[in-house]
Structure formats: C-alpha cells, structure tokens
Image: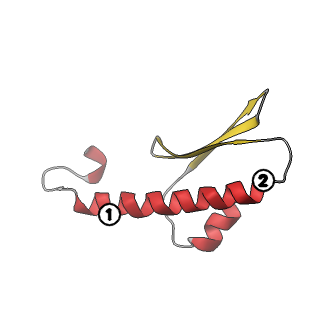
Amino acid sequence: MFSQLLNDKYEDLEENLTVKERATALSGSIITIFHRQTIIYRTALSPGIQQIESKANDAVKAVGSYMVKWRLERYLKDTFDVDYDEI
C-alpha cells in the first residue's frame, strides 16, 4: 500500500528508499523506511489490517517532508571541492 501511494503522489521520485519489516512478538511488526542509511519513518504495525492505510499515509507524508528538506540541504551545500556523495 505504501509504495502505491508514494508512486501516485510522487511520480518523479528518483531516490532509492529501503523499507524494512521486522516481526515482533508484542506489536506485530516494526516498519522502518530508510534513505541512504537515514531513518525517515518508523512505526509499529499490529497484526490487524485496520491501521494499514493510515500508517501508509503517514509514511508518505513523512517521506515527502524529508525529501523536500533533503533536496534543499543538498542544493545549498558547498560542493566546490567535493561532490555530494563525498560530503
């Protein structure tokens, strides 16, 4: 559901995101979304499917906010001597 919502809202997103799901005994599973080893969003998802849509929408909002901030920081960095990847 998350990837479908993200693709619908941000069709031009070219960055790679990693989504990891870790099962837990108490809360069902913990979902974490990373961008270049930075945690963007983390939540616990219970075994039922009642909250999946709201959690997916929250994740899309978090990713959108993070990407705007990340792009601004990237373009404002001084890259005279080194490239973006080397900073």
Q: Does 5 sit left or right of 46 as displayed?
A: left
**Image quarter hosting the N terminus:** bottom right
Identify which amino acid the numbered label 1 is placed on: Leu
Q: Which mark is residue 9?
A: none
Give the class, few, some or many, for how many residues have Cα within 10 Å of label 1's Cα (few <14, many ≥20): few
| Residue at image coords 45%, 57% | 66
- Label 2 to label 1, Cα distance in Å? 32 Å
**Residue 6 appears at what percent x and percent y?**
62, 65
Q: Which residue sits at x=84%, y=51%?
A: 49
Q: Residue furthest top?
A: 25
- Horizontal side of 83 relative to 64 (left or right) equals left
**Can the viewer see residue 10?**
yes
Task: Tell me the amino acid under the disc marked 2.
Answer: Gln
- Residue 5: give x, y in percent of width and height: 67, 66
Q: Name the residue under label 2.
A: 51
At mark 1, the secondary structure is helix
Helix or strand or loop: what does disc 2 sit on? Answer: loop
The picture places residue 32, in percent across and down from the top left corner, at 60, 42
- Residue shown at the point (32%, 63%) measured from the top left: 72
Residue at image mark 1: 72
Q: Is residue 1 visible?
A: no
